[in-house]
Amino acid sequence: MATSVEARRYQAYAARIRDAWRHGRLDAGQTRRLEAAGFEFEPRRLSGVVRIEDGRRFDTLKAAHDETGAAVGRISVAARSAQPWRRSAGGAHWISAGRWDALGEQGRRRLRGLVEGERLRGLWVCAETGEAYDTMTLAAEAHGMPVSRLQKRNRLDRRNGGVHWVDGVTYGRIRRRHPGLLAAWRRTMRETMLRGPVVCVETGVEYGDAMRAAETLALTGRTRNTPGMRDLINHVRDNPDRRAGGFHWASPEWLARLASADPALLARLRAGSAPKGNRHAIRCVETGTIYPSLRAAAVALGLPAGSATNIGHVAGDPDHVAYGYHWASIADDGTPRDAYPAHG
């Protein structure tokens, strides 16, 4: 009789423990101690599992495996976890069907919130640009730096690669509570970037800064206000929809990211955006040097600016020369952009 009473007491105790576990009322230390004592939170054989993200139910582990490709064992371990939001399998989080049913609607919403919070905490977010990456390796590759430079996040007093790195939760908190700090970081990044090199997207030529690019455009006759053109280049930098002096401009980092993320757009900018007429980029066949315009080619050869017309007449004609050289239009022959002359 005593044994029967003790068994009922244990069953009631186990039921209360499992109910507290299902609703997340046990901390990690309590869970570990119970597991070490051999307490079973779930039956050894799961009757079914539920994918927490969308609430889809699978009657068997095999069905979940067929749907996601995750190993049956990994799904089982994730579903039995005392904190299922911390363990994933096949890119999703899992919970046993019985525990899911016991949670109720409010408990399920809370569990999904925990899963989303865990996902955000795993992100690597560039605070200045808002770009988010699933892993540290992807973040390092996108910004062209070694992984060793991104070992720590959420160090608000330290920059890596010129920007601050935080997780998704911290980024959301900064946006809500400290918008002024975020604006200051972005302003600092922008000022640093504007002092750095700039690349002409159409020609691929890199200049030490926007002022040098503006000076080259002044040689082509595109502008007489060099400081004004410098400011305009900085204003349209990294914007594929805006030009300055007839060209698109970008920082080397942005151009590298564009080449990786959307090579078709980059090819379209380079192939279809070159200015026409006297402002057409042109290449000297013999030297391989590329000039941003006919006028720039004439000036580089020490000729009067009006000589550009003669160069334009023979461009693309292999049987005729101008001033001792053959000439080819960049937009016509699609030749890779080599380099501007020394004055550029």
Image: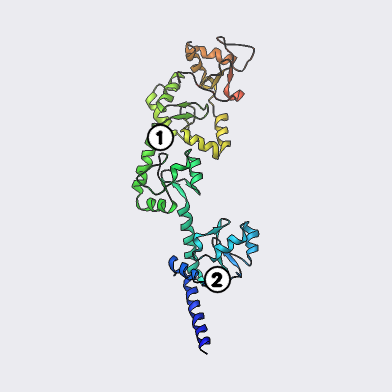
Compare residues 115 and 261 and report the one nearer the observer: 115
Distance, label 1 to label 2, CA atoms, is 56 Å
Left or right: 216 as drawn, with respect to 276: left
Which mark sits nearer the N-terminus, 1 or 2?
2
Q: Residue 193 — which label?
A: 1
User: Label 2: few (<14), some or many (≥20) within 10 Å?
Assistant: some
Above-or-below relation of 63 to 146: below
Q: What residue type is labelled 2?
A: Glu
Residue under label 2: 42
Above-or-below relation of 1 to 305: below
Q: Which residue lies furthest to the top in this view?
A: 324
Q: What residue type is labelled 1?
A: Met
Q: Which residue is drawn at 34% across and 43% down?
A: 184
Compare residues 13 and 247 and report the one nearer the observer: 13
Rendered location of residue 161, percent (x, y): 42, 39
Residue 223 visible in this rendered orientation of the protein = yes
